[in-house]
Amino acid sequence: MNTSRFALTNCRLVLPDTVTQDKSIVIECGKIAGITDEGALGSDVEKIDVGGRIVTPGLIDIHTHGAVGHTFNDPTAEAFDAITRENARRGVTSLLATLATAPIPDLARCFDFCRAWMKKSHAGAQILGAHLESPYINPAQKGALDPANIRLPNDGSVDAILEHRDVLKIFVLAPELPGALDLVAKLARAGIIPAAGHSSAKDEHILAAMRVGLRHVTHIWSAMSSVV
């Protein structure tokens, strides 16, 4: 554990109700220990002048497919390292590795790599789990997703994906498809957040899905019916 104690000074500190330029933030053992005036800092505290830059809590990105020419659908150390480092450089301290729909064996390899990555410490943003734009979407709202990988929720394939429920945090599907309500309920029971996306659902589909566990919408109005 990092036991150093230091303070960030000369920063634009973002607080819940204001942005201040006359405070310093003290870090101890890797966590925020307090906010104080620079003049109140003791001599035992290392002072780091950040040059007037903005200091805010780290951002959490729950939907990011990749960065700098790499995607999380490429389960390699090179890709994951490049993406997480770039996110950290831009203020994102943790994220959900978001996967585009793909053949299920390919998705399984991504989940396995993500699980292994999460067990170790890395220099970039921390990966908290996976956000899957699943195969169970409406072909009419496929957007940039490959139509060859689109399936129906009731075709018996979902159990192979749910073997990775320990990694999965958000699961995108179209609630209007045959078998979608059963899948939403199954996801909710497994502790995975069911999300509507790439969908032509109408209000009755959304309301029915909400009653069995739908809790989120992915990129609303993008690759989605305008009548939701």
Image (cartoon, grey):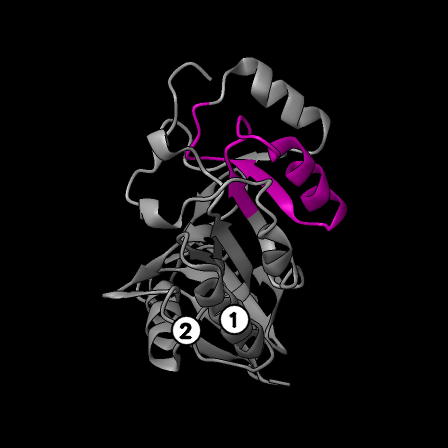
Q: Is residue 208 left or right of residue 85?
A: right
The percent coordinates of residue 135 (x first, y second) are 46, 47
221 relative to 8, above or below: above
Q: Residue at x 43, y 73 (%)?
A: 124
The percent coordinates of residue 130 (x first, y second) are 53, 59
Q: Are marks 1 and 2 in contact (CB under 8 Å)?
A: yes
Give the labeled residue for mark 2. Answer: 75
Mark drawn on residue 134: none
* Element carrying mark 2: loop
Q: Compare marks 1 and 2 and give the one earlier in the sequence.
A: 2
What span is in magenta? 171-200
Which image quadrant is residue 204 in? Answer: top right
Name the one closer to the observer, 189 or 163.
Answer: 163
Q: Amino acid at mark 2?
A: Pro
Res. 29 in view: yes
143 relative to 148, above or below: above
Q: Amino acid at mark 1?
A: Cys
Q: Residue at x 50, y 75 (%)?
A: 113
* Circle 2 Cα neighbour tier, 10 Å, few/some/many (<14 / 14–19 / ≥20): some
The percent coordinates of residue 39 (x first, y second) are 51, 66
Name the one closer to the observer, 90 or 2.
Answer: 90
Give the labeled residue for mark 1. Answer: 114
Check if residue 140 falls in the magenta segment.
Answer: no
In this view, the residue farthest toward the left is: 69
Give the total number of marks visible in the rendering: 2
Q: Residue at x 64, y 27 (%)?
A: 209
Give the distance between the C-alpha atoms of the residues marked 1 and 2, in whole angstroms. Answer: 8 Å
Which image quadrant is residue 189 in? Answer: top right
Q: Residue at x 57, y 82 (%)?
A: 120
Quadrant, the N terminus? bottom right
